[in-house]
Amino acid sequence: MIRHSDSNRDTGVRYLILTSLFLTGAVQLELDLSPNNGTIVTIGSNMTFTCSVIPCNETGSMVLLYRHVQKLFSGICNETFNITDRRFEFSCNSAECMYSLNVYDVDITDHKRPMLCIYRSSSEDMLIKTTSIGVLDDTYNFTTISPTGPFVDGESVDFKCCFQREDSPDTTLSFQCHGELITQEIDNFTCLNLNVSIDIDQNRTKCKCTAQSKDMSFDVSSELQLVINQYDLLFELSPITNVVFDTSTTLACRVAGLQYPFAFGHWEYHNGKEDKSLISSIISNETKLLTVNNITYEKMGIYYCTVVDVRKNNSIIANASTELYVQGMY
């Protein structure tokens, strides 16, 4: 039987421990998550959560999770990802082991919501770190309305009426804006959301966000006057056209960026004797054509390309004109 001395056994144990520490240290990673927990952010501002892997000597997989949005990063990346909810934007730079989430237009519902950073290394080790922000309204009011504008006729806007007081049972939050009214019974931080298609008829009207307790211990409100600008339509229309009798010609009308609630209407024709609405072919949301066949004097005149507001029974909001005339007519 071979016996080992205690000194040899101790030396072997120490060697195993040192080897274990060395191997563990070689893959030991840390997460750096900013901003620090409890950092105060003002309502309406923009802020960025950033999660970094230290040291940056490998490429694993990272998950960023905040509220209802999350993003998995795996492998090499250096790009930006827009989320359907336009308040959130993810980005990554794997060369620097840095992963970020931009939060735009911070509101009171972001208060103390945890931001979760989860990293899985190439050796399947998992690291988790969290942080959260405190949200402060620098107007010292209990209610806020966002965004504040100005707006453009026809654009889609997500309005928010937010109440910023904790532990407020039996409270009614109401939001009147753009001709609509919504209410909700609440007891804590809450935002009412209202999506509208901006109508220039609502220019200079006021939005009002009101929180009122049942016992009338508080009755607070915020107001916003809407400033709405006309939608600038950029027409590209066929020039004045010199035509020949009994031939045909095609008029083209293009409006870049044309979209709901605006659309092409009929072509309108005026020659001093009669007015007509003419049906044309629509090539796309931005382009329509009108073919004038068998040209005669009766078809000479001014042709108007019209754009209508579909919300208002297709009423014409803008037009541009061109003219047909017979060769030698002038």
Image (spheres, grey):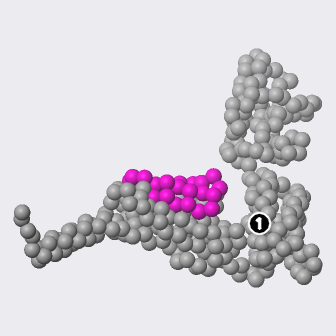
Is there any visible trace of residue 145 in the rendered image? no
**Where does the N terminus fall, quadrant-wise?**
bottom left
Q: Main secondary structure of the magenta part?
A: strand
Residue pictured at 42% horizontal, 56% vertical:
61
Vertical comparison of 141 with 150: above or below: below
In depth, the one of 120 and 259 nearer the eye is: 120
- Residue 283 found in image quarter: top right
Q: Please provide the residue range marked out in magenta.
A: 62-85
Q: Position of residue 263 (x, y in %)?
A: 78, 40
Q: Quadrant of the C terminus?
A: top right
Q: Nearer the viewer, residue 298 or 168?
A: 168
Residue drawn 44% across and 72% down? Answer: 32
Q: Indicate the secondary structure of the residue bearing disc 1.
A: strand
Location of residue 139 in the rendering, given as x and y in whole percent from the top left corner: 75, 81
The residue under label 1 is 191
Which residue is at a point 36% across and 68% down the rendered structure image? 29
Where is residue 202, by image quadrant?
Answer: bottom right
Question: In this view, which residue lies farthest toward the front?
Answer: 1
Q: Residues within 10 Å of mark 1 (few under 14, many from 20)?
A: many
**Apparent side of residue 83 relative to residue 293 in the rendered image (left or right):** left
